[in-house]
Image (spheres, rainbow, N blue to C red):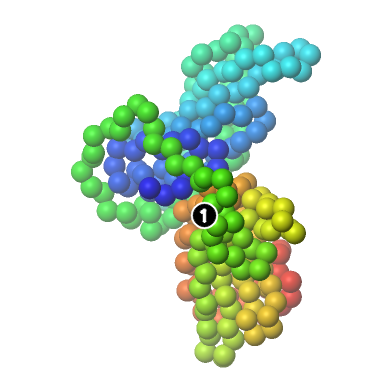
Amino acid sequence: MRNLPYGVEGIENLTDRGEVIGYVVADALPHGSGIDGPWLVRETKAGTFWCSNGYHAMDEIGAYCCWNAFTAIVAVEPNGKLVLKRVMLRHPNYHSHNVDLRNHLWYEIHYSIDDGYVPAEMLAFPPRAARPAKSAEPTITRAPAGVITALSNFGPYTGLDRKEQVKFLNGRTFTLILYRAFNACGLIGTEYNGIGVMDDDERKVLVDNHAVVSSGFYGATPKQWLEFDRIKTLDWEGFRAFVNGHKRSRYSI
């Protein structure tokens, strides 16, 4: 069982392919702006994903007053793009503002998943026979407290999920790391996570926080793993273009 994306309490799938794609869908969903509960993502027989959560509503004086349960239906187009199909309010306690609330949820979810794509490798995942639906109680995988610091580190880059060295024909050598947090003198910041590129020849940090997500506490996401694999297979010109064009690049190579 892989680690769940941040803010997701469960992914229920009917097929093996749905499990793989479900993680990409879950990782693209928004958090905040009233969407304060944990997401539960369910694969349907139609191949869409029903994503359930709750909107934390406020009253006239700005105090939280109630929860509005809702479900967003997300589909995956043939090219892998995530598309929001519908938003349903299941238990509206916010009667006079149902239309406004639905529109608010639509835009929040739409813009959050608009750049989301299921990589071709995942779309090509060989379909298998449908499996019986899982029990109503979702399986929840949570990282226990302290697990990040228990993993290996690379300097202040803490909780390594992967570490690999890449060598090019011109003799240049770099180390790629996939980390969960940054250790700032004992303060573990999980908001600083992703892929880092270390220049072994210069013994300097070249790029960090690439493909960053909202929190690295639950471990690397499927998209981060795929991006790590993409970077390590680049040729020298492709690698140079990636580094030199990155907003977090310390210097050009």
**126 relative to 211 in the view: left or right:** left
Residue 82: image location, x then y, percent: 48, 43
**103 relative to 88 in the view: left or right:** right
Check the image and report above or below for 103 versus 178. Answer: above
Give the residue drawn at x 47%, y 60%: 226
Q: Residue furthest left?
A: 129
Describe the element under mark 1 as helix, strand or loop: loop
Q: Residue furthest bottom?
A: 170
Name the one closer to the observer, 216 or 107: 216
Total marks drawn?
A: 1
Residue 52: image location, x then y, percent: 48, 28
Check the image and report above or below for 92 versus 251. Answer: above
Give the residue drawn at x 69%, y 18%: 64
Neighbor class of circle 1 (other Cα within 10 Å; few <14, some 14-19, many 20+) is: many
Residue 93: image location, x then y, percent: 58, 10
Q: Which residue is mark 1?
A: 220
Which quarter of the figure has residue 103? top right
Q: Residue furthest top?
A: 96
Q: Considering the image in quadrants, where does the C terminus appear? A: bottom right
Name the one closer to the observer, 165 or 51: 165
Which quarter of the figure has residue 140? top left
Give the residue drawn at x 65%, y 27%: 34
**31 relative to 225 in the view: left or right:** right
Residue 205: image location, x then y, percent: 69, 72
> What amino acid type is highlighted by mark number 1?
Ala
